[in-house]
Image (cartoon, rainbow, N blue to C red):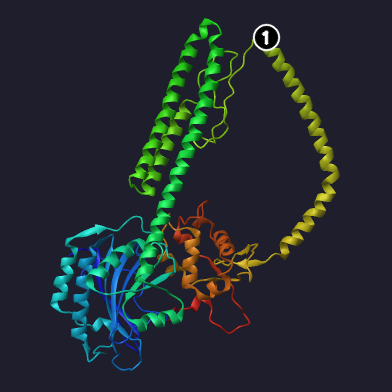
Amino acid sequence: MAENIYLYAFATFGHPNDFRQTCFLPTKRGTELNIKLFDLTNSIKVYPNSELYAIRKEIANGMKIISYSKYTFAKEKLSERDGTFIGSSILYTKSIANENITLKKLNHIHNELIKKNIVEERLTVTHSKDFLLAKTVVSDFDKISLELKIIDKSIDFSVSNDNLVVYSRLEESNLQQKLKKSLELLSKFDTLFFTDDKNIVDFTKSRGIYKVVTEADFDKEIEKIHIERKQKITDAIAKFEKNKLQLEEEKNREIENRKKQIEQNQQKQSENQKKIEESKSDLSKLENLYKTFAGHISILMSNLHSGKTLDEVNNSYKQFEKEFNDEKRKLSSTNHVSSVSNPRSTSQVSPFSNPYEKPNYGNYNDGDDGKNNFSKILTIISLVLNVLLIGGIIYLYFINSDNKKKLENAENIATSKEVIESNESDPVLVESKLNPIPNDVAKNKIEEIQNKLIDNSTKIDEVVKIVFEINKPIRDAYKYQKGDYEEYLIKENPSAFNSNKILINKDSLKKIPFYKDENLKTESVNNTTSTK
């Protein structure tokens, strides 16, 4: 039995259990997955004699997960309310089965679940853990793992908070194709639903939360993804072409400059001939280095044209660029002869050179005249420094009293700034553009937020999306100040992010600031729980 395939069954049971879901297979698993609920929110509802299918992406336990689910109407054992349902889901980590296999097994498992646990459209149990499963469910589940394919690396698993409902025919062949195409749309939507029931579609439209499209509109959404992908590749190729052109121009400047300096060196005494030959050798290596790098860029452009992913090409380009700069750095200090400047790059900074490289101006030795000139220059510099020192002392003396006044004013201004208490109860001076200014931190939601994050992958805007998703009061207060909230969150948790605003240590994300209105008797963020 594959370790990356899971079977869940779920339903609404009414008071006191409400919605419950249970993982039934595999029976022997190392750890439980901390996945989201398969519950339906008030944005969509299941009706009698209707079917609703869903494909969903998420990240749990540090793994990328895709799940396929089916919902049908079922009355709760002890209530008559509408919108209740029973459902089943096949969940994959790392790799997935072909859509035709998944759909057949999902339908079979769901039908057997209904046979064992529904009588006259009513549930016979009050909790998902009490569901009965037929033996054929286990055997069918084992067959799913026979043919698996790796989850497409191009799928963006970041939370988008957008969902799509497709009004579509549910014939098996048609639904298989829709589920297969849906993988391309998972970068844009968290969940895609499919139904042929008009009641479900009309209810979803009336709620106005999920986007509802027809089959034709669904194909247009796919085409948009294709256009966006082609545009990214076109932009990347244009950027590489520009880099190649800049590389050629820089090469010409470098070669021309070094040729002129080598010609000057060749005019010197014969004893410097050895150093001149070394310079020629470096020149040849440099030209070959540029030629090799230009060739690598041409190959990368061809790879993009032939279908390689942008991420793969970018990774290769970074490696080639690193090798280029490393080799070029070795050649940056060509041996030079007496009284002749060292052949160096004419450009200060280029996309292919090391901007942090320290200049080497060479050693000058023109005999006694050079030493005398150097002595005179040193004398002049000493006089200038002495004058500056005396002037500085006089300047400091006259502005000393004025500085004291300015310092006193600065201290008064600093004390007027807001002091916000951190998690460790240490007052932290924080200037904020947020309105209202945060005056507390969420404490009970930290672990839930951290579980949804991935180190070295999650950008600051994605972190804030998750914070807003889990903490409704924070979202309501700052949803129109998202950029300012991102900056504030980084200031509160500096060790959690790098200079590119990417999360590098989610365990250091311990301060989730929010505004707590002391005059209102409402629940704080720390006690907020999600409701369906």
Counting from the top left corner in percent of width and height, residue 111 is at: 20, 80
Q: Residues within 10 Å of mark 1 (few under 14, many from 20)?
A: few
Q: Is label 1 in a helix, a strand or a loop?
A: helix
Q: Residue furthest top?
A: 270
Residue at position x 73%, y 20% in the image: 377
Q: What's under tag 1, amino acid-wise? A: Asp
- For residue 94, which quarter of the picture? bottom left
The answer, for residue 270, to whether it is visible in the render is yes
In the picture, measured across the screen, residue 275 lies left or right of residue 139, that is right
Q: Nearer the viewer, residue 143 or 309?
A: 309
Q: Nearer the viewer, residue 369 or 10?
A: 10
The residue at which mark 1 appears reads as 368
Residue at position x 75%, y 59% in the image: 411
Counting from the top left corner in percent of width and height, residue 337 is at: 55, 14
Residue at position x 53%, y 20% in the image: 258
Counting from the top left corner in percent of width and height, residue 386 is at: 79, 29
Counting from the top left corner in percent of width and height, residue 29 is at: 23, 67
- For residue 49, which quarter of the picture? bottom left
The answer, for residue 25, to whether it is visible in the render is no
Q: Quadrant of the N terminus?
A: bottom left
In the picture, measured across the screen, residue 529 lies left or right of residue 214, that is right
Q: Quadrant of the C terminus?
A: bottom left
